[in-house]
Amino acid sequence: MALKQPLLFLLLSMSMMIHLSEGEKLSTDYYKSSCPSALDIIRNTIVDKQITSPTTAAGTVRLFFHDCFVGGCDASVLVSSNSFNKGERDADDNLSLPGDGFDAIVRAKTALELTCPGVVSCSDILAVAARDLITMVGGPFYNVPLGRKDSITAKVTDVKGNLPQPTMPMSDLIALFAKKGFSVRDMVALSGAHTIGFSHCSQFAHRIYNYSNTQSYDPSLNPRYAEGLQKACSTYHKDPSMSAFNDVMTPSKFDNMYFQNLPRGLGLLDSDHALIADDRTKGLVETYAANQTAFFEDFVQAIEKLGLYGVKTGNQGEVRKRCDAFNSLDTHN
Ligand SMILES: *[C@@H]1O[C@H](CO)[C@@H](O)[C@H](O)[C@H]1NC(C)=O
Ligand SMILES: *[C@@H]1O[C@H](CO)[C@@H](O)[C@H](O)[C@H]1NC(C)=O
Ligand SMILES: *[C@@H]1O[C@H](CO)[C@@H](O)[C@H](O)[C@H]1NC(C)=O
């Protein structure tokens, strides 16, 4: 195992380089002459949307992660299902993909198509929007290299086994990230995005109701927090959209409070709590809880890496006219 892992890393990073060199290189000024106002248009649309719907930031970051982790950052997650093809976004766990994120991207795309039709890809819009929203709610700024093409396929079956699930054991989570070239440090830093996240009650109901024969909730939860969650989720069977913030203290601010919460029993999901319970991740949680700068530095490294994962360039993809549909019905399936 100790030998296999680095080899896997090496192979993955080599294939990523080859992949990139086949097409064009990404660059931060990719749209400088073809659509000079692209970044301003995206930012203005996103800022408006976040002000009217404060869950946009969490929804968009979640969407970006989901998109990149399933077959690369290629906007495949945005494609709607139709009668021929069930899209990636309609996977079983699509409840966790909130509509605000989709809507933010659609709005930015609509505005861009008026100014520079057919130029700016949906995958670039999603990458920039996630960055702008993270920065807007208090997180770090980082550069987003551009020039991604949008995928010409998106299948619900691509999702299987590619996304971290809240009840996965830590070893499986680490293996899932490692398979895609992400270290334990990347994984813990990216989990810090839960500082603005929320999760549906069904994802943690087993922790707060009928936990065992003798305990109604998971004893690793702070008792007052557990009782609050029991109340907040009391009718989730009837209303599956009921949810709770992953960072109960400062849910709308991108900060290191998520990590400070974990040792206090304020981790919402099993996978949140596991970060402080497992020796492989505990030290990083403690570092980030004590030092927000350290968290932001590692988060930037990890999300920049995420934004390059499996990107398509040149003729490996297209610039979609609409983010929720391929340009031609015949180019896929
Ligand atoms: C995913 O969400 C859509 C609505 O956005 C819904 O119609 C569909 O049934 C959902 N899929 C699953 C498997 O829950
Ligand atoms: C917990 O278990 C009891 C007894 O089996 C059951 O009546 C009750 O509905 C359960 N509560 C929840 C929230 O699942
Ligand atoms: C916090 O982390 C940053 C970045 O790693 C480091 O430069 C700084 O010295 C740390 N501050 C403290 C008080 O440890």
Image (cartoon, grey):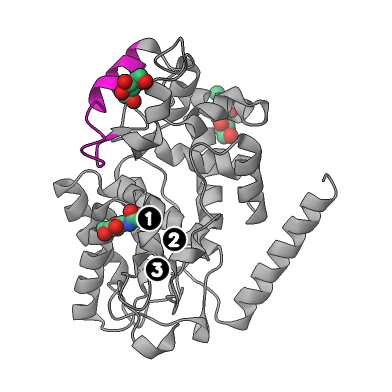
Q: In the image, 37: left or right of 153?
A: left
Q: Which residues are magenta?
A: 224-243
| Residue 236 placement: quadrant | top left
Q: Quadrant of ligand 1?
A: bottom left
The CA distance from mark 2 to mark 3 is: 12 Å
Rendering quarter of residue 224: top left
Read off the residue under disc 2: 67
Classify mark 3: helix, strand or loop: helix
Q: Nearer the viewer, residue 270 or 9?
A: 270
Residue 73, given in percent of the width and then of the height, sits at 47, 65
Find disc 1 in the rendering and name its residue: 63
Q: What amino acid type is highlighted by mark number 1?
A: Leu
Q: Amino acid at mark 3?
A: Asp
- The residue tagged 3 is 124
Q: Is residue 94 visible?
A: yes
- 114 over 199 or under it: above or below: below
Q: Picture coordinates of residue 148 (x, y %)? A: 46, 73
Count numbered badges in the picture.
3
Instruction: Kindly check if marks 2 and 3 are in contact, taking CB atoms under 8 A apart as contact.
Output: no
Structural crowding at the residue carrying mark 3, measured as other residues with C-alpha within 10 Å and reported as few (<14), some (14–19) or many (≥20): many
Residue 57 counted in the magenta span: no
